Amino acid sequence: MRIKLLIATAEVDYAEHLSNILSEKYADIFTVSVCSSAERLKDLLAANSYDAALIEQSFETATDLKSIRMPLELIDESGTFSDSNLKKVRKYQRVSAIAGTVMECFADVGKQLPSFHASKARITVSWAPSGGVGKTTVALAYAAQKVLSGKQTTYLNLEDFSSTSTYFQEGGKSISKAFEKLESNLQMFLRGIRRQDGGSGISYFCGPDNYDDMNILSSENIETLINACAVETDELVVDLSSRCDKRVQSIFELADTVLLVCDPSASSQVRLRQFMEQHNVFGSIEEKTVLINNKGAKTPDTGISRKVHLPIVQSADPISVYKTLSSGNFDW
């Protein structure tokens, strides 16, 4: 589905600019119409219905808005606006921010509407039975390489304590907001809050507001979240904590590939062996597992046929590390 969006403002140049960018960059999301007079707006609304509309104050009071499913008030830089209960959207900000706001708002009113389309990403999970082995570095290096190969790639951090802010700029809407939309059109809401890193091209979500937000989610909630993230992208890379509870096991079931990460340390090698020999979960994911020997690790024969060997990268900058590793060989 696409959102039928009406832009109603007397500023013709601004309306055309906004319409052109939305039509070019969000063609799969919006069908855009423009109106530059109150009289024309009356005629349009008498003959058509719209899913959403960005309407400046003078137009808002001049006509009946009943044929608009979700009217939004477009305000200028002075911040002056009417006393109506309509949500306010500021002009002249980044078009991506305006588009995100429309999608966020529409996620509730459009929760009964179908999703944009049924395409689904390949899901790759980065996991290890021990911490500190470089799961996140591996996940991001893999994601960055997929971007370089032309794939639209989204990174989803589901660690107990998110490290997203270490690698990407925060400041956008927290993914915690999505947890409040599990019963709404979650796919649309996630599209609205998803950001893209300018350096790597990886799409991502800002970290949760606090620890409990992520950890109170049930296995069913996590499955809903991942399935919604896996639409509108080619590759979804999921970064997990080192536990192996029911939630993690349910994510393994959704995954197409599991990157099982280890490093040269004795603790990593021992826990890897324990997981493979003593945990029945490994048997269920063995066929889709790729062993990632990180930091120059040389793991003895494990029986896993698909392996990747990543070198030690001498840098204190974690961003530099994953970008260096992204030029390595992730073909298996």
Image (tube, rainbow, N blue to C red):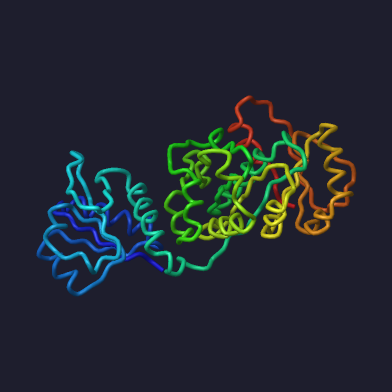
Q: Is residue 223 left or right of residue 34?
A: right
Quarter assignment of residue 226: bottom right
Tell me what residue is drawn at x 21 percent, y 56 percent. 55
- Residue 64, how many percent across, how many down? 16, 65
Say how many tags the image has.
0
Tell me what residue is drawn at x 60 percent, y 54 percent. 222
Q: Quadrant of the N terminus?
A: bottom left
Tell me what residue is drawn at x 73 percent, y 49 percent. 245
Tell me what residue is drawn at x 45 percent, y 60 percent. 184
- Residue 242, how many percent across, how many down? 72, 42
- Residue 87, how many percent across, how many down? 28, 51
Q: Is residue 280 left or right of residue 25?
A: right
Front in this rendered view, residue 240 or 13: 240
Residue furthest bottom as drawn: 47
Position of 154 relative to 120 (above/below): above
- Residue 273, how many percent across, how many down? 87, 43
Quarter assignment of residue 210: top right
Q: Is residue 275 left or right of residue 59?
A: right
Position of 60 relative to 271 (above/below): below
Front in this rendered view, residue 139 or 146: 139
Residue furthest left as drawn: 39
Q: Is residue 184 left or right of residue 69?
A: right
